[in-house]
Image: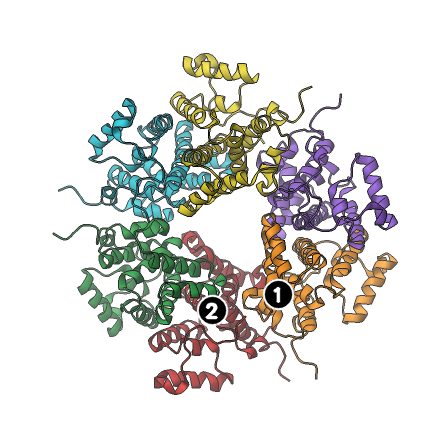
Chain colours: A green, B cyan, C yellow, D purple, E orange, F red
């Protein structure tokens, strides 16, 4: 077990290009801390920019899939990939967005037992197939999603989120980056 | 997703043999609720008795392995078996016994990233091997544990706990028993 | 290969609690020898009692499932778990109970090729799924058993036997306990 | 379960080419019955001839590897391939050649627990690797065999037997051919 | 990476039995070079003869399955077995026989994406099942082939080719035999 | 088999944002055709930009790892993921950059048999581990790379390329995008 942020260099904020630094300061302002994955990627500004541009294009909208559903995909596939950072950090976001303190633990352990709708179950069955044995995806898998009302854009989003976090999981495994401590508890206790 | 306690009959407390009922009332008194696995097993009193006798013989002592270490084995192997009830219920107990609100989520996701000692890592490597590909266990695996100071009794306990929860996981999968809601939060928030 | 009974201490009969010793003497009287698993577990009397109480509650009845069918489950799932002791010892019992000298070898190698009924095939398909990928069991698997006439009690028995021998296999892998020699031939030769 | 000899045509002996018929009559004379695999292959005389020529070239010699050791390879790898015919038929031959009534059941269940020498263990570790994940074989695996005294010819024989029975297992799975009943008991009872 | 023809002895042509030498000279005349597998097997003349007799009995006919379809089976199953020699050498033959410069690369990577007919897809689904998990083949798999018009002889051929190349793949892994360089380009460029 | 570029909408060039269209025209000018993955991603301009920015940041440099070595990682891991587009398209680039017409087929089939240096073998062993079982990566895997002279930047590049193409493979599986025909032959024939 390591509590280092990364196996690779983590630059000082001052040493970063301005746009990267500002992006980090913005998330710090919103979250109250800097999620470690921002610091892990900062030593590579071009990759940092592409990563978060890609992330935001996929995760920050709620057409077709709700924001909570997007996080469900992240948690379920990251648990299959045993990525601690992704499960804990996105589990926190999922709990908040779904307003359900149990959902992340359920999806991380066995999505068949989670408090989800049949439509969400179909979404996650597809996401897990694409994530763990994607070469077996065929037209019939796409059709099975349409039956549940997913259109082209929603299906693309499911698959693209799977792809993006297949990358993200592997970057975390490469760097050995642990989740920030606050993520463990976020969204578990009703705000009083 | 089901919120039923079991796919099989769940008897009324009044209909149970006295010793079974008393065991259930005792745990309710201690925990504030009846963990679902007690109700799931109650329709089979002889099995109920053997199950909890066995459980207590393995889990309610702290020689060789601490009580927290015993729960670590349960959480890590039950996560490998994707048993939601066991991960959530024993995760709660583990957080309390280890006084660490992060440890259960870490072990449930990837034990290589958990805040544990090298000795505990060796214990869990062995437990996971025995749980998932036990036929490959050979003398060298036992010797590797002795190097970390585990004696005969401690090694037996590791293995017997693995065995007991291999059974327990499958009973839960059979019955479809969900964890009680309070387990999700137990041990996560410092008592004020 | 080892011919030791266990990697752990094997107590002298005289040193055992009376009820444990009597249970061992009783099986010796019936079988003509002491099956090694009794000696392997004797160093832990509380676990010994729970183990055999549990075993007898599941295996010594013939309602819903015949005794031979119970042994079929043990042999098929223990072969999947590559547990030599369980395959050989319970293979012997199965041959005797099914009055079929080929059935154990068939189930231990490939249950799809065994001389069994479609109902028994369904029983073993479920047992093997629960044993090797139990987290995938869903309501539909239970329903598939009902189609073959299994009721709640029979389905519970199938699953509980799977669970018990998932434990038993792992205890044997832990201890390295070999089968007693007489088991290899029992039930193979017609009594003349 | 089928008791048919094959899913494909089984010609009458009279309809076979003379050399094929004579080969079948010769094995019948030796064994007292015609092993089903001879009848399963008879509808394809050219393949029949190549198959048994290949078989005899590999199995009917005892230089480098004893005949019993050759059968060990067949039983261990055919059990990994879950081929009932090969495990039962070659298990019988192995028991006779090794003069050990337990050895086939041991190798069919878990070769790590069999009554074999370290040299034979190394032979079977290699055979199982080549059989189940042969693409991972590298020079170091060959060197590990030389350490145990296997020379070029013996190593080739191990590998060629693995290859031949990889084919044989699949032919049996294709045809669904069951073992002849006498194989189950052969070599188990000391001749009186 | 090795450029040796074999880990085992490769005899001089002059030292070979006449029939073996003539077979090698004949293929050299046809192909312009001696495929390495002929040289790899030459140190064992009896096995050499059986191997190529078997090969020719299965591959040199075009009833039921075209010659191109036979090579499809070889390429798809050898890719699953990660056998470089078989994929490259039979990929070359496949390109020529199918008059399609892309087909071998497609089948070697993901047969679901290849330019093949539904009948060929069914053939390869079966071939891959028999090759990688043959113990699961049951009557229904055979019936699924009949639906596509395959008769007994064609189905046998599919299965026998799978079996033969299961052997062949393992012999290549044993010997470490690389493909001859010309195979890489054969059938890729239209003859001008 | 499909020859459609994507299961999702493929916009006309005229309908694209100017920067996207220019990027597509630039690659067309260089390559002589538009690689299908550009068209597949064009319906999502923000993702298109992030994808190719990320791609170029990782693939268009030759410090630490040569450009050919970067393509080796793509081909080996995409073959493990059975991604036809990535294997064929990047196989073409690899052949050209490595000036070796055999290397892509070797890496796509079995990287252990490829014409590579021990340093490249270590690079690909790590890449394949991160790609297929990344959760098992630990400090020792990183150290094993340093022994071969890879520094922080080179190790990061290996891992980031693995991550990026884990995403890319899944996008292709999602969209069902086939490789452009010219890729199959590129780099195979010496320019005359």
Residue behind mark 1? E119
Q: In the rendered view, would you say D137 is above or below E94?
A: above
- Identified at 66% across, 47% down, the residue is D176
- Identified at 46% across, 16% down, the residue is C23
D47 horizontally vs A157: left or right: right
Q: In the rendered view, would you say C72 is above or below E159?
A: above
Return the chain for callout 1.
E
Image marks 1 and 2: residues in contact by CB distance under 8 Å: no
- Specify the quadrant of the image occupied by residue D97: top right
Q: Nearer the viewer, mark 1 or mark 2?
A: 1
- Specify the quadrant of the image occupied by residue B16: top left
Viewer-side residue, B81 vs D142: B81
- Specify the quadrant of the image occupied by residue E109: bottom right
Q: Position of residue F135 (x, y in %)?
A: 41, 53
SS for callout 1:
helix
Answer yes or no: is residue A95 visible.
yes
Residue behind mark 2? F65
Viewer-side residue, F31 vs C19: C19
Do the residues marked 1 and 2 share a common chain? no
Q: Position of residue F110 (x, y in %)?
A: 58, 61
Q: In the rendered view, would you say C32 is above or below D117?
A: above
Q: Residues within 10 Å of mark 2 (few under 14, many from 20)?
A: some
SS for callout 2:
loop
Q: Residues within 10 Å of mark 1 (few under 14, many from 20)?
A: some
Q: Position of residue A54 (x, y in %)?
A: 33, 70
Answer yes or no: is residue B136 visible.
no
- Identified at 55% across, 60% down, the residue is F118
């Amino acid at each position: 077990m390591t509590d280092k942020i990364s196996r690779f260099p983590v630059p000082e904020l001052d040493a970063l290009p301005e746009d990267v630094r500002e992006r980090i300061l913005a998330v710090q302002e919103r979250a109250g801390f800097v999620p470690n994955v921002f610091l892990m990627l900062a030593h590579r500004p071009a990759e940092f920019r592409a990563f978060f541009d890609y992330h935001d294009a996929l995760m920050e909208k709620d057409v077709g899939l709700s924001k909570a559903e997007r996080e469900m995909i992240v948690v379920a596939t990251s648990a299959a990939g045993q990525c601690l950072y992704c499960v804990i950090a996105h589990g926190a976001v999922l709990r908040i967005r779904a307003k359900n303190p149990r959902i992340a633990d359920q999806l991380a352990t066995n999505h068949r037992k989670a408090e989800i709708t049949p439509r969400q179950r179909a979404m996650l069955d597809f996401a897990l197939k694409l994530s763990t044995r994607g070469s077996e995806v065929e037209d019939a898998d796409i059709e099975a999603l349409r039956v549940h009302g997913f259109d082209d854009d929603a299906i693309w989003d499911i698959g693209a989120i799977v792809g993006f976090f297949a990358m993200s999981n592997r970057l975390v495994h490469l760097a050995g980056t642990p989740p920030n401590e606050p993520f463990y508890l976020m969204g578990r206790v009703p705000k009083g």
